Image (tube, rainbow, N blue to C red):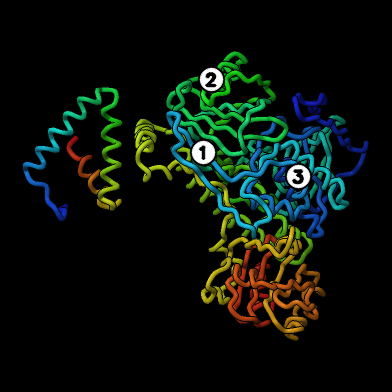
């Protein structure tokens, strides 16, 4: 019998709420659900909300009774915030989080590199925002509770997964005994130690790195701005690296690398933690300040992925499918992109609006993204925690040179998580005019946000279906487009047309955005009226035309639904 | 591997002596670090990663 922890977890700043476990009714027959998500972490909850926004109901199983232990993922990127905006929780994160865009690297007391993430007035969200994972999960849970299409069962742990070819058959254990649950589609969002992955006996591919880090959250009143701090080879921890991040509620995250050969148990001894945190505070000139420990853990860098995120009726998102080094904030931020990439496809497939094959493009796109991240993160990880004598020598040579030579300093910059561009996606229309554009996002790329007015941005106006941005100066849509829209609606396809340009409302368009100063046209490289962009429900571009025509639009829409056989 | 300004014998001898003296000054603990720093500075001056990779391969021979 599953016995999840029923006492609230300890925290000096977060008030844990223990939810009642869901227990199966006695003697109930096997249940059937269209979509089951395993895991109510940030990625699973985000997927549930995005599925619901597409009209698809789902059941979420969570083995624990409360949100994450400790702050865990604390840095969320601009793209994650845009995805969380689609899920409807961005406002609370913006309200509570600490935005930032600068990173500083220090060696021998000298600042040797300053990272500046670009930020313009066309962006609604900062490049990065810091917030403890417990709060993010709480906001997602509140949104889930307000969503009638989602059911969440606390204290439900997947014990076994039997068949998975035509449907998935689960045994779920609860504090009140186990029960059988069948579903058409199973989404594994159950994290690095995924039960679903081990039940299917799937192996992650890639590398594990030797370097281990202690992650410690302390409450301390440091007079420092919200910027990332990195210390290489500090006097108190020779040869190793220390990172610091500011979190809300007076909390600071200190990550420090363990000396080679030290075990996690040794590292987490209170006396060891205290001595090292004191030494780091001494290093930055604040050794006299009082502090209090909230939570600590040990982390080791791994760069691993499943080679395929779809196994018939089972789909993997987040850490269940891959484990990525934290340098560059790639864990949760990659997971949100997985959730977004899967949710719209699964909703359309489950609702019978697209063939199963659409899900294969999810796996192709996101495994490709994970492999690219692994390649990039490998470079960062080899710099942060050199895996061999040769790499250590080169890293140390760069540290030494960086005190006087500019040319090596960019090597300090570990590439930060960014939205993946699906340039080779099968869903990109082969027949668009992309090459004729002078700028703007190309096929497979994420959208560009544009400031339309005070607190008003282009992405605020997009919903969770396909969106056609039609650039015009006419009072009405072309007749063929209105007919194509009507056809899509009869089929139940979520598709909207946004007319961009004129100040008066364009007839038949779902909305009209006046592009008074031409900034939307500039950002999207539109030189003349009649151009259009087709955005997928995850907002990535799948086709763009300098001169829109309905035949090519229909082809592109069918291609993006993986149904090229359907006549336009 | 001809550069535009080939190293004369006298020039090579100067480099030989300077490098030897520098390795001695750095000491056993730091001479490897010195040589790697030197290699990175030389790579910047050469400005050609393909050529530098060939130089690494040449150095790797007959160790």
Query: Horizontal and vertical percent for residue A14?
Result: 77, 30
Compared with A428, A89 (above or below) is above
Residue furthest toward the bottom? A479
Compared with A106, A357 (above or below) is below
Query: Horizontal and vertical percent for residue B58?
Result: 20, 44
The residue sitting at 82% across, 24% down in the picture is A7
Query: Horizontal and vertical percent for residue A386?
Result: 42, 33
Q: Is residue A337 something that shows in the picture?
A: no
**What whole-number distance in Å separates the C-alpha atoms at marks 1 and 3?**
25 Å
In the rendered image, residues at marks 2 and 3 fall on the same chain: yes
- Which element carries disc 1, helix, strand or loop? strand
Q: Which residue is mark 2?
A: A279
For residue A95, the mark is: 3
Residue A138 placement: quadrant: top right
**What whole-number distance in Å separates the C-alpha atoms at marks 2 and 1?**
19 Å
Residue A464 placement: quadrant: bottom right
Q: Chain of mark 1?
A: A
Q: Which residue is mark 1?
A: A104
């Amino acid at each position: 019998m599953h016995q999840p922890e029923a006492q609230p977890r300890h925290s000096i700043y977060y008030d844990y709420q223990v939810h009642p476990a869901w227990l199966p009714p006695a003697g109930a027959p096997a249940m059937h659900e269209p979509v089951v998500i395993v895991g109510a972490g940030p990625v699973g909850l985000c997927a549930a909300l995005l599925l619901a926004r597409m009209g698809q109901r789902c059941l979420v199983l969570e083995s624990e009774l409360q949100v994450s232990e400790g702050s865990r993922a604390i840095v969320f990127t601009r793209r994650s915030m845009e995805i969380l905006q689609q899920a409807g929780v961005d406002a609370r994160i913006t309200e509570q989080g600490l935005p930032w865009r600068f990173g500083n690297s220090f060696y021998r007391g000298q600042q040797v590199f300053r990272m500046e993430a670009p930020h313009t007035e066309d962006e609604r969200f900062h490049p990065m925002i810091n917030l403890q994972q417990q709060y993010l999960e709480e906001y997602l849970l509140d949104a889930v509770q307000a969503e009638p299409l989602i059911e969440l069962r606390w204290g439900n742990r997947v014990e076994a997964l039997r068949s998975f070819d035509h449907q998935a058959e689960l045994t779920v254990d609860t504090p009140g005994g186990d029960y059988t649950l069948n579903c058409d589609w199973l989404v594994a969002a159950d994290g690095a130690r995924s039960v679903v992955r081990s039940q299917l006996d799937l192996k992650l591919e890639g590398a594990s790195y030797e370097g281990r880090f202690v992650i410690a959250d302390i409450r301390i009143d440091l007079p420092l701005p919200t910027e990332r701090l990195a210390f290489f080879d500090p006097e108190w921890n020779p040869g190793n690296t220390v990172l610091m991040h500011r979190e809300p509620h007076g909390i600071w995250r200190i990550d420090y690398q363990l000396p080679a050969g030290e075990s996690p148990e040794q590292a987490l001894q209170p006396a060891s933690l205290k001595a090292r945190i004191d030494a780091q505070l001494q290093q930055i000139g604040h050794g006299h300040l009082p502090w209090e420990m909230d939570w600590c853990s040990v982390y080791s860098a791994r760069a691993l992925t499943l080679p395929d995120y779809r196994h018939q009726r089972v789909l993997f998102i987040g850490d269940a499918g891959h484990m990525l080094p934290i340098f560059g904030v790639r864990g949760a931020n990659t997971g949100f992109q997985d959730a977004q990439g899967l949710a719209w496809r699964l909703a359309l497939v489950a609702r019978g609006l697209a063939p199963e094959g659409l899900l294969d493009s999810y796996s192709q796109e996101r495994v490709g993204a994970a492999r690219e991240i692994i390649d990039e993160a490998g470079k960062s990880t080899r710099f942060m925690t050199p895996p061999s004598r040769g790499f250590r020598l080169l890293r140390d040579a760069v540290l030494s040179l960086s005190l006087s030579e500019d040319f090596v300093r960019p090597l300090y910059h570990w590439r930060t998580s960014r939205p993946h561009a699906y340039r080779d996606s099968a869903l990109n229309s082969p027949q668009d005019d992309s090459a004729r554009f002078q700028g703007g996002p190309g096929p497979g790329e994420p959208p560009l946000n544009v400031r339309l007015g005070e607190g008003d941005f282009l992405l605020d106006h997009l919903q969770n279906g396909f969106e056609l941005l039609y650039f015009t100066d006419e009072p009405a849509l072309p007749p063929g487009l209105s007919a194509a829209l009507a056809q899509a609606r009869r089929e139940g396809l979520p598709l909207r047309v946004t007319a961009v340009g004129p100040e008066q409302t364009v007839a038949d368009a779902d909305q009209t955005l006046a592009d008074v100063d031409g900034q939307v046209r500039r950002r999207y490289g539109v030189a003349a009226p009649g151009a259009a962009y087709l955005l997928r429900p995850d907002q990535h571009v799948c086709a763009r035309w300098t001169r829109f025509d309905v035949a090519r639009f229909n082809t592109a829409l069918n291609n993006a639904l993986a149904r090229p056989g359907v006549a336009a | 591997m001809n550069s535009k300004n080939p190293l004369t014998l006298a020039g090579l001898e100067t480099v030989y002596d300077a490098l030897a003296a520098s390795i001695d000054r750095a000491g056993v603990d730091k001479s490897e670090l010195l040589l790697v720093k030197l290699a990175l500075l030389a790579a910047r001056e050469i400005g050609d990663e393909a050529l530098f990779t060939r130089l690494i391969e040449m150095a790797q021979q007959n160790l």
